[in-house]
């Protein structure tokens, strides 16, 4: 039986893939900027120092997972939303803040997945 593909895709990254990836990276960097701003005010806000080691580690892992996603690695696809949700819940639990950058990033990831990742899934390793 002949394999039928719904997507006529090639492994080349098009403008849609690159622009969606850039939007994900932009909102991830914006979340990092919020964390950096909180770090600069941590004495005034009474935030423990250990929190920033954890949150900056999550930020770094999110950027690494985006880079892995760009180079067609499945581990990036699975780790990015998990880290993003962890980042959101850490802000909600420890700082009682609702980060719209994280929510927007999650919606972008979902849209990015539907339009750019799923058609290229067979090229991911």
Image (spheres, grey):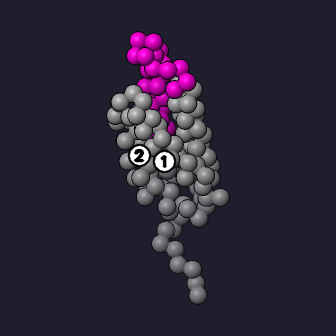
Would you say 78 lies left or right of 33 here? right
Can you identify the residue that label 1 sits on?
81
Query: Considering only vertical position in the picture, is 64 above or below 39?
Result: below
Q: Position of residue 83 (x, y in %)?
A: 51, 42
Front one among 107 and 35: 35
Q: Is residue 86 visible?
A: yes
Q: Main secondary structure of the magenta part?
A: helix
Q: Position of residue 20 (x, y in %)?
A: 45, 46
Looking at this view, name the residue that lies furthest to the bottom: 1
Looking at this view, name the residue that lies furthest to the top: 44
Identify the disc placed on residue 62. none
Residue at image x 49%, y 20%?
A: 48
Query: Considering only vertical position in the picture, is 86 above or below 110?
Result: above
Query: Considering only vertical position in the picture, is 39 above or below 19?
Result: above
Figure label count: 2
Q: Position of residue 31 (x, y in %)?
A: 44, 31
Residues shaded magenta: 23-51
Would you say 112 lies left or right of 68 here? left
Identify the disc placed on residue 106. 2
Front one among 95 and 9: 95
- How many angstroms separate mark 1 from mark 2 (CA)? 7 Å
Q: Position of residue 108 (x, y in %)?
A: 40, 47
Quadrant location, the C terminus: bottom right
Which of the two labelled residues, at mark 1 and mark 2, occupies the earlier sequence position?
Answer: 1
């Amino acid at each position: 039986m002949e394999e039928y593909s719904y997507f006529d895709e090639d492994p080349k990254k098009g403008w849609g893939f690159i622009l969606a990836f850039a939007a994900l990276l932009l909102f991830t960097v914006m979340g990092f900027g919020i964390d950096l701003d909180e770090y600069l005010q941590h004495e005034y806000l009474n935030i423990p120092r250990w929190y920033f080691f954890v949150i900056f580690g999550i930020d770094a892992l999110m950027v690494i997972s985006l880079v892995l996603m760009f180079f067609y690695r499945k581990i990036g696809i699975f780790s990015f939303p998990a880290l993003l949700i962890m980042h959101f819940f850490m802000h909600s639990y420890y700082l009682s803040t609702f980060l719209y950058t994280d929510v927007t990033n999650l919606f972008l990831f979902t849209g990015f997945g539907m339009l750019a990742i799923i058609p290229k899934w067979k090229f991911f390793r």
